[in-house]
Amino acid sequence: MGSTTAEHEHGPEGVDTTHPEGVGRRDLIKRSAALGLITVPTMSFLSACASGGGGDDDTSEDTQGETSESNPFGVKKGSKLDVVIFKGGYGDAYAKAWEAAFQKKWGVTSTHTGTQEITGKLQPRFNAGNPPDIVDDSGAQQIPIDVLYKNGQLLDLAAVLDAPSIDDPAKKVRDTLIPGTLDAGMQEDKVVALNYIYTVWGLWYSGKLFKDNGWEEPKTWADFLTICKEAKAKDIGGLAHQGKYPYYINVAIMDLIAKTGGLEAMKAIDNLDPKAFVGSDAAKAGVEAIYEIVEKGYLMPGTNGLTHTESQTRWNQYKAVFITSGSWLENEQLKQTPDDFDMKFMPMPLLPDSVMPFEAIRAGSGEPFIIPSKAKNLPAAKEFMRMMLSKEWSTLFAKEANSLTILKDGVDPGVQLRPGTQSTVEASQAAGDNTFRYLYTEWYSEMDTAIQNASNELMAKRIQPAEWLKRAQAAVDKQAEDPDSKKNRRD
């Protein structure tokens, strides 16, 4: 959910973006994210949120201290900070380390909640106008960012991003971040969510399984299908996907669309083009390629009915060769991964006549952190987020969560990443500027859910590619009718 969207379940991202049971992540990468998987809130939540609002002026006097050069937001010693963290693939040990450091520096104690039930625990609090001060809003039960924003529930983070950097006060915080990583948290040109984790999405496989079978990383779709065919002959599934969370299979479909048609094909979807899907050769090729896996019986048996963690665990048991996910996967599967599994990440293989090179990957920020507009301790929440974007806290995160942040060169070189995560770093380096990232998952949660639902039907063979394209286009067209959609656009 990190995420997007299932970022994930991180993953949106993200996920996990996003993730329901266990210490699973999604929902994604949203998240990206989300990065994660996005759950559509109940109407009671939507209507209740509609009365919400507030802004920077809502700070109560008992949390406002004196401002200074070293204390730009006026953190007040002795105040309290209410922190809620999505406890998925990245756990929440990193946040506890942050909170301890924050208390030591500022004398602010925190109330810590680590949970996967983001909507369940926070919906009543948002409805009552009593939200936490800072939230990692990710996972399968993520509250969609666009919903919170439309109902006035999110603080514009400009003040944090324009504040002096902890590490170099001559620079603004925003100038210390990897270019483009703020985009996923934008609504109407305002950054209202800080997608904190640098996430990549794509295919994963076992180095051991490849070595045992003499396989090489497939760079073309034809080579990918050849491996799937050989695996099937050995009673191994070619592809596992997290069937109950179709966010994940959309990683594959959307990657193929972008790599085949280039950035223009991707932007057409984000910009709600009337030919984003129906009339798009790239979209037709991408969805037909995924459906070919279904038709030829290359899916891992039972994968359509499994949660993300169930599918991923079977993949760890060598019951499938490939699985789609974001870079939270290794963390999420630590307990289920054999010591000699040798987890590896790879970009999506190329269809014929693809515009992008094989090395191109979906990459960007996942795991959205938000400050509710009605937070009781806005000064401390802003300073907490500013400190998140320091090298000290970025390194703390990498040590505890085995992942990179959006801070440029933000992790101490001495931090050792696990093999799977290290392979995502190497893939990012190989990709260079050949990266892409969809934003519709963050901008339009209802549209995202409709496309996910169509993919669920597709993978179960209840619809075919032509119908998937129609349903996806219908979701785009419906979203385009919303006047607010004109406020989001990619050039």
Image: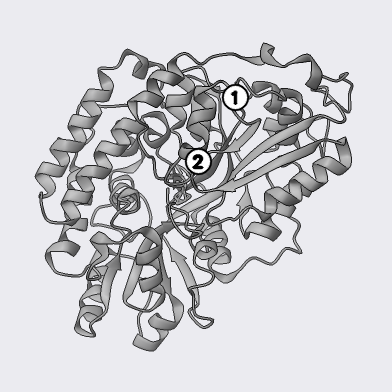
Q: Residues within 10 Å of mark 2 (few under 14, many from 20)?
A: many
Which structural element holds mark 1? loop
Q: Name the residue under label 2.
A: 118
Q: Which of marks 2 and 1 is in front?
A: 1
Earlier in the chain: of badge 2 and badge 1, it is 2
Residue in the picture at 58% in, 65% down: 422
User: Which residue is at a point 37% across and 77% down the rendered structure image?
Assistant: 216
Please name the amino acid that badge 2 sits on: Ile
Look at the numbered disc 2 and give the secondary structure of its residue. helix
Please tell me how crowded label 1 is: few (under 14), some (14-19), or many (20+) other residues with Cα within 10 Å: some
Report the side of 20 relative to 446 (left or right). right
Looking at the image, residue 21 lies above or below residue 34: below
Q: Write down the quadrant of residue 202 in the picture.
A: bottom left
Residue 117 appears anywhere in the view? yes
Total marks placed: 2
Spot occupied by residue 9 in the image (x, y as percentages of width and height):
45, 52
**Label 2 to label 1, Cα distance in Å?**
15 Å
In this figure, which residue is indicated by the disc labeled 1? Answer: 130
Which residue is more in the foreground, 437 or 454?
Answer: 454
* Residue 413 coordinates in the image, percent (x, y): 75, 60
Left or right: residue 416 compared with residue 464: right
Q: Give above or below for 491 relative to 21.
A: above
Q: Where is residue 173 in the image (x, y as percent from the top left)?
A: 72, 32
Q: Answer whether labels 2 and 1 touch (C-beta < 8 Å).
A: no
**Location of residue 206 in the rendering, given as x and y in whole percent from the top left corner:** 43, 76
Q: Mark 1 belongs to which amino acid?
A: Asn
